[in-house]
Amino acid sequence: MPMISQFATRLTFLLFTGWLLTACASNPYARTNKSYKKQVKAYARSLRTIPGNNPAEDSLMQGDYWVGTTNFNLRRANFVVIHHTAQNSTAQTLKTFTVPQTQVSAHYVIGRDGKVYHMLNDYLRAWHGGVSKWGNNTDLNSSSIGIELDNNGLAPFPEAQINSLLQVLALLKKNHNIPSANFIGHSDIAPDRKTDPNALFPWKQLADNGYGLWYDDMVPDTVGVLDITGLALDTVMKYNIPENFNPEEALRIIGYDTKDLEAAIRAFKLHFVQKDITVILTDEDKRILYSLYKKYL
Ligand SMILES: [Zn+2]
């Protein structure tokens, strides 16, 4: 090898080693990343076990020999659940999600500056939903991807953060084929416990981009009120909602757990009304609910 080429090879090697050392030294999460890798290895080992060994399977009358199918792939998430962290910084949340005692995590954490931390492979189960229900789905952690937005619980969501969120959602929708209706918030699936993301979260902007459903604007009919002579006394605005419209049933059809009806109404208003989140359904709220309900039917 000519001298100059040998020198170049050695220099490249030194530069690479230097970069590697700096990269390792500068990652404050090197230790917990090791723990991540260890856990992933254990799951990979379990997947490689042939034949598969499930709890209590020994008590079954087994077939004469092991037959593995040739046709399968990994399970995919079918929902995306959006949260605010209710913490003071991204760093605080990264810490929370890397301390075993907290028992909480999410797949993605997005900072106010738009930086995205992908903390868990999409195919693995994060612990972000807790006790939750959406429709008949009672294990959202198994079927969803959790996204935490760094937010103290009261602040608006900066543009950089929402732009990054939209990019992450685009990837998730494409990679996992998630239906538009299945982009929801933590408060939607746990209305009696959670109020995130807060009322300043731009759900309409998300829906305009295909993530989550939104109601249609409905023009009220002008209804004339006549006196006995047939002369118009007044006109009132009336939305065309059927007499027998049942808001509780509509909330349930959309997916809300209505066991605690007031909590379900509050969660619905936090997502779709936002300007007030009282537990009273105004005519306008009912109109929004009716429009959405028809989309979910
Ligand atoms: Zn949450």
Image (cartoon, rainbow, N blue to C red):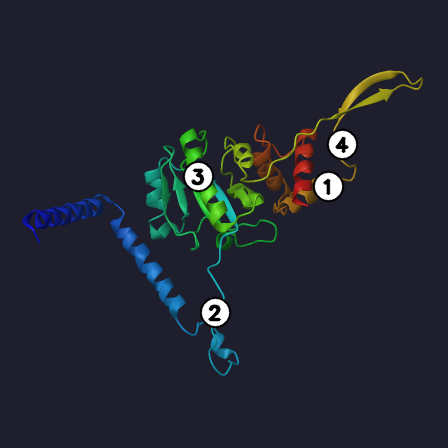
The CB of the residue at mark 4 lies under 8 Å from ligand 1: no
Q: Which mark is residue 167?
A: 3
Count of labels in the image: 4
Closer to the chain start, of discs 1 and 2, is 2
Closer to the chain start, of discs 3 and 1, is 3
Residue at the disc numbered 4: 240
Q: Amino acid at mark 4?
A: Asn
Q: CA distance from mark 2 to mark 4?
A: 54 Å
Residue at the disc numbered 2: 70
Q: Residue shown at 44%/31% (left/top)?
A: 157
Q: CA distance from mark 1 to mark 2?
A: 49 Å
Residue at the disc numbered 1: 246
Q: Nearer the viewer, mark 1 or mark 2?
A: 2
Identify the image quadrant of residue 94: top left
Q: Nearer the viewer, mark 4 or mark 1?
A: 4
Choose between 74 and 24: the one closer to the eye. Answer: 74
Q: CA distance from mark 3 to mark 2?
A: 35 Å
Tell whether label 1 touches label 4 (CB within 8 Å).
no
